[in-house]
Image (cartoon, rainbow, N blue to C red):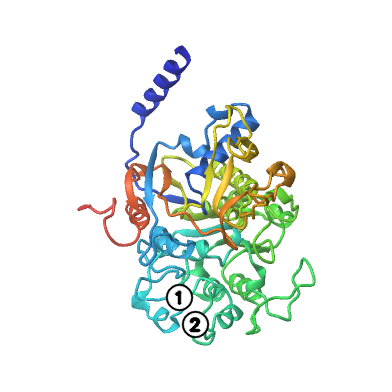
Amino acid sequence: SAFWNARCQAELADQLAKTPIVSQAKNVIVFLGDGTGIATFTAARLLKGQRSGKYELEQSAWERFPFSSIIKTYNTNMQVTDSAASSTAYLNGVKGNQATIGVDANVLLGDCLAMNIEQFHTESVLKNFQDAGRSTGIVTTTRVTHASPAGNYAHIAERHWENDNDIEDYNGDPDACDDIAEQLVLGNTGSKIKVIMGGGRKKFLPEDAVDPEGETSGRRKDGQNLIDTWINQKNLLGTNSYVWNRSELLAVDTANTDYLLGLFDYSHMEYRVDNDASNPTLSEMTRAAIEVLQRDVNGFFLFVEGGLIDTAHHLNEHRSAVEEAFEFEKAVEVAVSMTDVQDTLIIVTADHSQPMTINGYPSRGSDILGLASVSDVDNMPFTTLMYTNGPGFRDQKNDLRPNPVDENYEDPHYVAQATVPMVESNHNGEDVILYARGPHAHLFTGIHENAYIPHAIRYAACVGSGLSFCSADA
């Protein structure tokens, strides 16, 4: 009793000491754990506790943030959202249709003509910062043209239209619709982003260009080399660096760099469990991004995505997913250490959940990535983490499920068991959590729509339209 009374009294004292910071947010950093529902956040904390020796008493970096909120994730035509429609909501403040980005509900999936009507375009917080004369950046472990980062700069009727070849593959007209990579390099918003880091070189390179990591060629049919285009553009504007591997990134003189483009893989970046030495960590990319953006005395907006959490979940690879969430937390810690809570609003949230559950009654101190206990029906062990749907479904033999011990469940890419067979898992539609620290972080309490998030950011940072802290009549 003495232990818990003392611990919880200290926790109460900390809660009573929390006071809102009521001043303008000079900088805003949005950390997006793609597919990171509460179960994933919990598993990542338990993994951290196993490694620190604090076990269940460990805290994740965001759990030390003073304010938190529950966020609803449905979109205009689906109860369970995808990453595209959700990015429109939490970055633009408007809900849209499934698989569309940066457009409102007037634009249906694949409708190129409607997508080109500016009246249907939504405006991102990133663009609001640009309009206010402040620097912007995006960092992700997926392709930089993937659904979540694209919500910052693209207006597209089909999330898969990442280059002109993709548009043709999905029966669209690349002459009538600008693909996402094109919008990033040549678009009004994308071309002004000062820091861009992630994967996806194939979306920028023409078919006759050889990727620097092998014999694979680019995927663009229009002949454009958008990497060269970016370099040529930025040569006219200031000091720039294009890098494609970790060594080059770590050698960048960030104190004298105005624009930074890092494309570290042909497609998505590699999982950390695969130890690809050519890929920087999310923490290293976050540090470099902040160092470049902090040169702007007016402030900055930075979007950081742990995107491979979601891709691993889609494959039912719970070990890879939780390891990616563990890496995601390290990036948050970097941002906290490099910024001042008095002028920088940091938000940590998810776009949606994934159907991973924490099962059984494992003992305190158990390996969260290991076995929970033994079934009282078939007398076989089962893993603590499993999925309700996905490729992990197994056919039963003699009315028995496979024994995970026989399947090498300790493999980093072990596919956990799932209830319903799917090629890839479908998302989980439960509400997600948001953590916040810094100016006006107290606006993130209670239960909110995901589209509320950018409205609160705009208020705190005095950008865009609507209510503003800096307005006399706010």
Viewer can see residue 344: no
Q: Residue at x 58, y 46 (%)?
A: 386
* Disc 2: which residue: 177
Q: Residue at x 56, y 40 (%)?
A: 43
The x and y percentages for residue 428 are 47, 54
Residue 169 placement: quadrant: bottom right
**Between tags 2 and 1, which lies in front?**
1
* Residue in front for this viewpoint, 191 or 14: 14
Residue type (three-letter) at the residue carrying disc 2: Cys
Residue 18 has which mark?
none
Residue type (three-letter) at the residue carrying disc 1: Ala
* Disc 1: which residue: 157
* Residue in front for this viewpoint, 210 or 446: 446
- In the rendered image, the vertical position of residue 444 relative to residue 130, given as above or below: above
* Residue in front for this viewpoint, 187 or 238: 187
Most extreme residue toward the right is 215
Q: The N terminus appears in which quarter of the rendering?
A: top left
Crowd band around label 2 with a 10 angstrom C-alpha radius: few (<14), some (14–19), many (20+):
many
Horizontal arrangement in the rendering, residue 343 relative to residue 305 (left or right):
left
The x and y percentages for residue 162 are 56, 73
| Label 2, label 1: how far apart the Cα atoms are | 9 Å
Q: Residue at x 58, y 52 (%)?
A: 418
Most extreme residue toward the front is 398
Q: Are marks 2 and 1 in contact (CB under 8 Å)?
A: yes
Crowd band around label 1 with a 10 angstrom C-alpha radius: few (<14), some (14–19), many (20+):
many
Secondary structure of the residue carrying numbered label 1:
loop
The x and y percentages for residue 301 are 46, 55
Most extreme residue toward the left is 473
